[in-house]
Each structure stands twice: as C-alpha cells, then as structure tokens.
Image (spheres, rainbow, N blue to C red):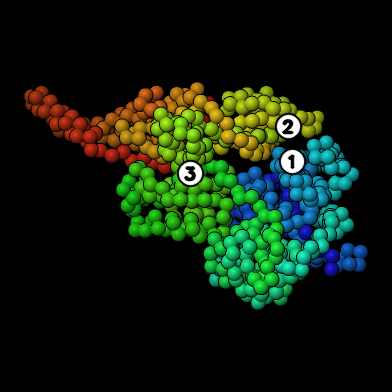
Amino acid sequence: MPVRNFSIIAHIDHGKSTLADRLLQATNAVSEREAKAQLLDSMDLERERGITIKASAVTVYHKHKGEIYQLNFIDTPGHVDFAYEVSRALTACEGAVLVVDSTQGVQAQTVANAYLAVANNLELIPVINKIDLPASQPEKVAMEIESVLGLPAEDCILVSAKTGQGIQELLGAICERLPAPRAAVTTKLRALIFDSHYDDYRGVVVYFRVFDGKIKVGDKIRMMGTGRTFQVTELGRYTPFPTKVTHLDTSEVGYMVAAIKSLGDVRVGDTITHENDLADEALHGYKEPKQMVFCDFYPASAGADGSSGKKGDFEALREAIEKLHLNDASFTFETEHSEALGFGFRCGFLGLLHMDIIQERLEREGDVEIVQTAPTVSYLVDLNDGTTIEIHNPADLPDLSKVKAIREPIVKIEIICPTVNIGELMKLCDTRRGIFKGQKFVSDDRQMLEYELPLAEIIYDFYDKLKSITRGYGTMDYEIKEYRQDNLVKVAILVNGEPVEALCLICHRHNAEQRSRSILQKLKAQIDRHQFEIPIQAAIGGKIIARESIKALRKNVTAKCYGGDVSRKRKLLEKQKEGKKRMKTIGSVTIPQEAFMAVLEQGD
C-alpha cells in the first residue's frame, strides 16, 4: 500500500484545522454524526481561542485511480510561539500542504513555515483556502505565493475547507505530487519520536514515525538517547480515533504505550530501537527548544514568609506544574523565593502566547490561583574574571563592579503590512531601538519590512501596537539572531524603602528614567492607600532616579471634640502623629497582582 506522510502548515487562522476536518470527512474517517469543528483540537482552550496548540497526527485511507493510499498527516499550530511543534512535525514527513487564506494573502508565519519546510527538503503543495468568501482574491494571492515563496502560481490548488470545494483535487495532488517515503536503509528498527503526552491510566503515550525496520506488540525496546528499556504493551494509529494494531512497518506513523511512568524517560527526537538488536546509529533528532521568555508563578494566597492562606497552596502549584510539564516539555521550571510573594517557580517559555497558555492551563487543569510577575528575557553577563553567566531574572544580576558587559538577545523580525502603514511601523521600530535591514514588495498594496530588534522590546505590547497601527492587517514573525552588548542597567523598584525583586527590571540606560517614571505612576494607581505615606522609588545602584508618594489615609480623630479647649484637639493629633510614625516603621505594604503587571507596560 503506498504511503504519504505530510503536514498541514500555515499562518494562524488561515484554516488548517478546518481543512483537516474536511480531509477526515472526505476520506470517510469520520461520519457526519461524529464530525464537529476542530475535531483534532482536543483541548477546551484550543476550541475557545480557535487556535491549535498541540500538533495532532492522524492516519486516513484514500482511493485514488483504483489504488488505496495510506495518508498520515499532522495538523500543526500556526502561531510563532509554537514553531518548535511545527519543526518536529516536519521532520516526520516528506511533504507539506501550505495553506494561504485567499482574503489575507501571504503572511509572516506563512513565509517562516515555508522556509522551515524547504530547510527539511519537503515537497510543498500550495493551497489557497476560503475561496467561497466574497472578499476572496485567489489569482492575486497565487501571484503573491509565486513572488514571495517562488512556488508556481499555476500549482496552487483552490479550495474551500468550509464547503468542501476542491478537497478531492487536493487529495489527488497529495497522492500524485508528494514523494513516497524513502526505503529502509537497515533491517534494524529505528523510529523517531516526534511527540508524547501523559495519560493517567496508561502512562506516557509516545507518537513516532518508523523510518527503518518493524515494531510489534510485545517487543522489548530501548530509547537510544536515555538508554531506558521498555516492553511494548499497545500499538495503534489515530484514524482519528485510537485504533489498536499488532505492528507498524517502515514509513508508518502511530502511537505506543509501554508502561512508561515519567516523561523524563522519553525525549522528543529520540530514536526507538530493539533491545536485542540495537541499531548502529540513532536518527538525526531535534535541537532542544530554547526558552526566550521567563516569569515567576506564585500561589495567589502565599505570604511573604512562604506561608499560604490555604494549606498546601505551594504544593498544589508544584503538582500542577509537574503534571503539565509531562504533557508539554517545552517549558522549564525551577523553585524560586521572593521576599514579597513567598515560594514559587521561575518558568521559561518559548514566547508570550506560550506563557499565557501555560498559565491558563495551570489554573484550569490544576485548579490553582496564580500570581504572575512581569515577563523578562534571558541575558548573557560577561564578568571581569573572564566567565560568562546566563541570567533569567534581573534580581540575579551580579554586583555591577564585577560585570564587564551585559548582552541581550537580538531578533530578526519580518513584518508584512499594508503599504500605507509603513511610516508608522518604521517609527514604532525606531522607538524600540530597531535597526532597519530591508524592505520588499509582496504585492501592489503590501510590503515586508525586515528589522533587528532587542527581544525585550517586543515581548509585551509590540504585537498589539502592530495590530493597532495596521488595523489588524499586519503580521510578524521573528527568530533569535544573536546576543549583543549594549548600555544596559538594572533598575530596582523600592516600595516603602524595601526593594521588591519581582518588580526590578533590566533596560537601556537611555530609557531608564522615562520607563521608571511610567512604572511608578502605574504602581501609585494600583497600590491601595495605607494609614501612612508610602514612598515608591526607582534606583540604579545607589542613585534614586524617580520617586512617587502614595498619600496617607487620614482619620479625623478630632471629630468627637465638639467644644472645649484647643489643647484637647492638639493632644489627639499628636497621639495620631506618633501612631503613624510607629506604623510606618513596622507597617507592611500589600502589592496587588495588577501592580506587578504594570511593569509590563512600556512608557510611550
């Protein structure tokens, strides 16, 4: 039986999941009764947001010119934060279906995913989707695909994933135009793991593609990377419902259950082989994902001493994080302690949406309330003794007398936007310390801008401002280029004279004062007034560069004095003054979650 392995790739919201639904229906993998929107998106969060977070692998069968083809396809995420999921899926395939929205045209992530597929030597089939919409411009989009990606306009297949128009032509093209899997180069088993998730009852479920040899139920296998051995208890394919099989041959895709208790025993990109007939060398795997955005998660009711309002809040958060890490190994975590927030975890993410998704999944699936600090990026710090350290938290920056240089991550960013918005976007990039690198024409009314920007300048509100300037028509994609030295300083935020580590930040010296004043004004608006005056300050080293004061609440202690000598009132006021003085000495200031998020805001 001929086999075709391919991925569905596209920019976010161009119709990948809907196209996957139509392919399942067209190949009779699901009946009309079983069919539903976003069938492969199993998480509630994916359905609510209308995005794909985890790649899903499915096996279907299609009859073409009298021959039955086995089609193994993977529906991948479209957002830049989940590009690692896409890269893993592409490694398990020989081809890719590149979906482009006929009303929006080629977007930034379209270009990035196409380059990723070409880098993996995959055959591309360009598909123009949503041709049933009144605003559809398939001919114009086909010319964009040819000019930007170099794929012939006449090779584009016009489909409507919503109505099913063009789906049969697409299935025919997949069978004819995509290459067959390469022949086995050895009889020894070699299978590449491209995903895994944790099941409460069966342990870790491993998704893999067999490149050489054959795997059967009952085989004793070895993970070549970790060296761990297991016995296969179940094999199967998703069609799209789990279907058990007794064996999987060369070039087939499936899942495996082998009583694996910890995801630490399984590494994505590892090679599976037989314990009694080891392969000579492992398959080429994946490079580990590099976390670029870091923030702290603390239990919402934890106290400054690490105590909790509810017993076991910290342990509940630890359990939730460890369980989620079994299903998503692309984020990291380590224990952290803050004077203001108690015990929590320092977590690393692939991007800001990834961070947002992880926080929401923790709160839903782990039933915990979380206080999140402002996200930061990683910095490389060159010390005077010749060593270099990597820090993920501004509070970890060593004493400046020991620091020779601070290097920050620089990204190469590609922005596709309407021509009328070019000037405003250039101004935005310039205010964020951007370096102009190039400009290309995508079509008559759209252009692509290339800039180099510090990652710290784009992780929070850059994308929102881009969408606002372009009225939703602008898109961007970025990749880490290098770490570059600049005049960076650590700004400490002091509340009532005490430094709050969770609020300190690293920024460019030129922007430090303006950024500090903006932050202090937002903190002043968020922190409640107390019975004593609260000074909030920003400092670089020992120098205060900005200050705001939160005025004290004053109780009218003389209200009950409705007559008599003025000395009575003076006595009460002096007593109040002494009380406020003592309160200021021993009083503590509670800082709400909104105050921590205020650090995110960039001063315009």
- Label 3 vs 1, first from the N-terminus: 1
From the viewer's perspective, is 265 left or right of 470?
Answer: left
User: Is residue 33 visible in this depiction of the protein?
Assistant: no
Between the C-alphas of marks 2 and 1, the distance is 11 Å
Amino acid type, mark 2: Met
What residue sits right under mark 2 in the picture? Answer: 448
Q: Residue at x 57, y 59 (%)?
A: 327
Q: Give above or below for 360 relative to 193.
A: above
- State the SS at label 3: strand
Q: Residue at x 67, y 23 (%)?
A: 423
Dots 2, 1 in contact, CB < 8 A: yes
What residue sits right under mark 1 in the picture? Answer: 111
Between the C-alphas of marks 3 and 1, the distance is 30 Å
Question: Where is residue 441 drawn, in percent x and y?
Answer: 78, 30
Q: Residue at x 49, y 34 (%)?
A: 386
Residue sitting nearer the eye, 422 or 232 = 232
User: Is residue 85 visible in this depiction of the protein?
Assistant: yes
- In what quadrant of the picture does the N terminus appear? bottom right
What residue sits right under mark 3 in the picture? Answer: 295
